Amino acid sequence: MEQTREDHNGPSPAAVYDRIGIGYKNVRRPDPRLAALIRQALGGARTVVNVGAGTGSYEPQDAEVTAVDPSQVMLDQHPGPRKVKAGAEELPFADGAFDAAMAVLTVHHWPDLRRGLGELRRVSRRQAVFTWDPEHRPELWVVEDYLPEIRELDASRFTPLADVVEALDAHTVLPFPIPHDFTDGLQTAYWRRPESYLDPAVRAASSTFATLPASVVEPAMERLRADLESGAWHRRHARLLEQESVDYGYRLVVAGES
């Protein structure tokens, strides 16, 4: 997987989010349960660098946060006063400049994962990285039933969790099952709200949906629409409607000083 990432010739993180970033924060609203987990992992840090910051989701309100992102479209939506346009692989900060570094659902976009994680370790004494493990099962039903193309795309972008843990020399890995009413509209957020995937605005805020061609996504969504109207989806996934949360492989990886 690491070889695949380093040889990646797809669009840069800036290019992806310059395209899908418009209106991003209207769908990707921080969920307080994940925010609490990340805040705890940051260990009361006074100064934090948020790499791949986007619109500033999950930044601790009681810390001095510096937002770093390669996309100007995303930085323009960030409300903070300290914003730096840069990639993770070359952070323009001195060694140990921050108490902590955070990176939330961004490392799969970095052209050189190990170099980026090395930069997190260089500029901070503690690191908290929220990511997803492509080797985890079960898969989201959208992938299994409607868009298996997502599986191949995600496998080409996401590094197995074990590699992230090793690169960070992490001491803690915390699972985060996705609640059924999760407010942050990532790809898995609507596992119990299937009709939400029919909304183009919801899909546009997911880099996976936004990367796949419309010729692939739109017929799949029409099949989903038909299954919802006929009741086939509900018959197939009735057990999901009884669950409060599902572990789909999201993990918070913590490294560095306590």
Image (tube, rainbow, N blue to C red):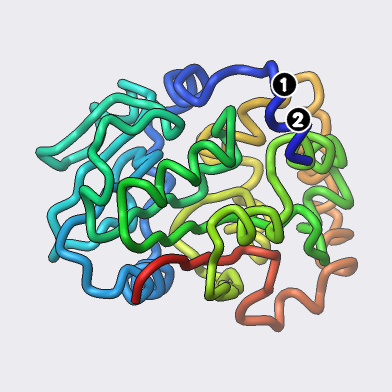
The residue most toward the left is 81
Q: Nearer the viewer, residue 58 or 169?
A: 169
Instruction: Say which quadrant the C terminus sits in.
Output: bottom left
State the residue position of label 1.
214
Q: Amino acid at mark 2?
A: Val
Q: Nearer the viewer, residue 189 or 56?
A: 56
The residue most toward the front is 95
Q: Amino acid at mark 1?
A: Ala
Quarter of the image holding residue 202?
A: top right
Residue at 76% in and 58% down: 140
Q: Under tag 1, what secondary structure?
A: helix
Callout 2–callout 1 Cβ contact below 8 Å: yes
Quarter of the image holding residue 4?
A: top right
Q: Position of residue 20 (x, y in %)?
A: 48, 26
Q: Is residue 88 left or right of residue 200?
A: left
Instruction: Say which quadrant the N terminus sits in.
Output: top right
- Packing grade of label 1 (10 A; few <14, some 14-19, many >=20) is few
Residue at 59% in and 53% down: 167
Q: Is residue 99 left or right of residue 160?
A: left
State the residue position of label 2.
217
Q: Position of residue 120 (x, y in %)?
A: 40, 47
Quarter of the image holding residue 178?
A: bottom right
Q: Is residue 165 left or right of residue 91?
A: right
Q: Position of residue 129 (x, y in %)?
A: 48, 57
Q: CA distance from mark 2 to mark 1?
A: 5 Å
Residue at 33% in and 58% down: 58
